[in-house]
């Protein structure tokens, strides 16, 4: 079955960087876009960006994260990555990867990765 | 950017009774291809979001038929015909018609 398995909890100091992985199984990573969404404690969902399925590795990021975020993919291992730099306490959140179906909805989600910046 | 506004933000419900959540968009969600990319997500406590409904009214695989979606243009509704205990959580509408994708604020459904 289709699964997205993310890397584990991270604790970082302000100013540091974090790189989260999201490993896909049950389908070919190279056929689907992947989004990243974050959720601050007790808050709603916030879209961060998207990475394309093909070798062009096209990415688009939310304006709030431009210059601080980088999304990459390794099709050989079926893994996508999201790196966020210059971390601030307000970046404390659960970060999710979510697959975009062919019809644009987010059909499968990772379990989430808690990042604490303190 | 499209803003989605959900009403209510909190919904006390009674087991076995219906529940309804509204989602209003700041712009029409009809895409140039004719589709409306409005979906509904459920987030149970401590869990990641889960897709319930896509393109207004299509139930995702494994979603019970007590969940239904309706609407058009800028106004959409998620209905639960008979609330069960496992339905407790936060529900989000989400649009992917226009870039960037955006979410409603969430509606907390509690018994």
Image: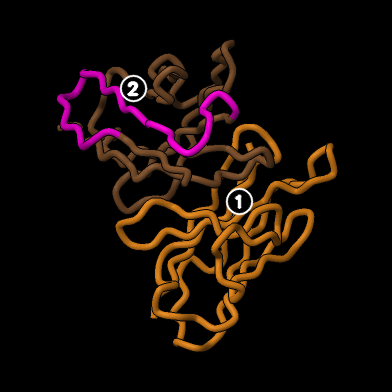
Chain colours: A brown, B orange
Residue placed most toward the observer, B10 or B79: B79
Tell me the residue at 45%/44% (across/down): A109
Residue placed most toward the observer, A20 or A68: A20
- Quadrant of the image occupied by residue B77: bottom right
Local packing at callout 1 (Cα closer than 10 Å; few below 14, some 14-19, many 20+) is many
Counting from the top left corner in percent of width and height, residue B105 is at 49, 54
Residue B89: image tag: none
Counting from the top left corner in percent of width and height, residue B50 is at 47, 55
Residue corresponding to mark 2: A84
Quarter of the image with the N terminus of chain B in it? top right
Single out the residue that lies furthest toward the top: A56
Counting from the top left corner in percent of width and height, residue B104 is at 54, 52
The magenta segment is A7-31
Q: Check the residue under mark 2 and report the chain it is in.
A: A
**Side of B70 where B18 appears, left or right:** left
Q: Check the residue under mark 1 and report the chain it is in.
A: B
Local packing at callout 2 (Cα closer than 10 Å; few below 14, some 14-19, many 20+) is some
> In this picture, is A59 found above or below A104?
above
A84 drawn magenta: no
- Quadrant of the image occupied by residue B98: top right
Tell me the residue at 58%/57% (across/down): B40
């Amino acid at each position: 079955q289709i699964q997205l398995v993310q890397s584990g909890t991270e604790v970082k100091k302000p100013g540091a960087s974090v790189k989260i992985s999201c490993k896909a199984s049950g389908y070919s990573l190279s056929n689907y876009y992947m989004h990243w969404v974050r959720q601050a404690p007790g808050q709603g969902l916030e879209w961060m960006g998207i990475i394309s399925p093909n070798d062009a590795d096209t990415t688009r990021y939310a304006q709030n994260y431009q210059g601080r975020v980088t999304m990459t993919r390794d099709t050989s291992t079926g893994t996508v990555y999201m790196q966020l730099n210059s971390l601030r306490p307000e970046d404390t959140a659960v970060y999710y990867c979510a697959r975009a179906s062919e019809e644009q909805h987010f059909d499968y989600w990772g379990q989430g990765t808690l990042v604490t910046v303190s | 950017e499209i803003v989605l506004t959900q009403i209510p933000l909190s919904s006390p419900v009674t087991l076995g009774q219906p529940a309804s959540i509204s989602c209003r968009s700041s712009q029409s969600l009809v895409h140039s291809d004719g589709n409306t990319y409005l979906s509904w997500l459920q987030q149970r406590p401590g869990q990641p979001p889960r897709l319930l409904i896509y393109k207004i009214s299509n139930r995702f695989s494994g979603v019970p038929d007590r969940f239904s979606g309706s609407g058009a243009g800028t106004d959409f509704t998620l209905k639960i015909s008979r609330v069960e205990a496992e339905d407790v959580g936060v529900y989000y509408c989400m649009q992917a018609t226009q870039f960037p994708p955006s979410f409603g604020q969430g509606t907390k459904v509690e018994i």
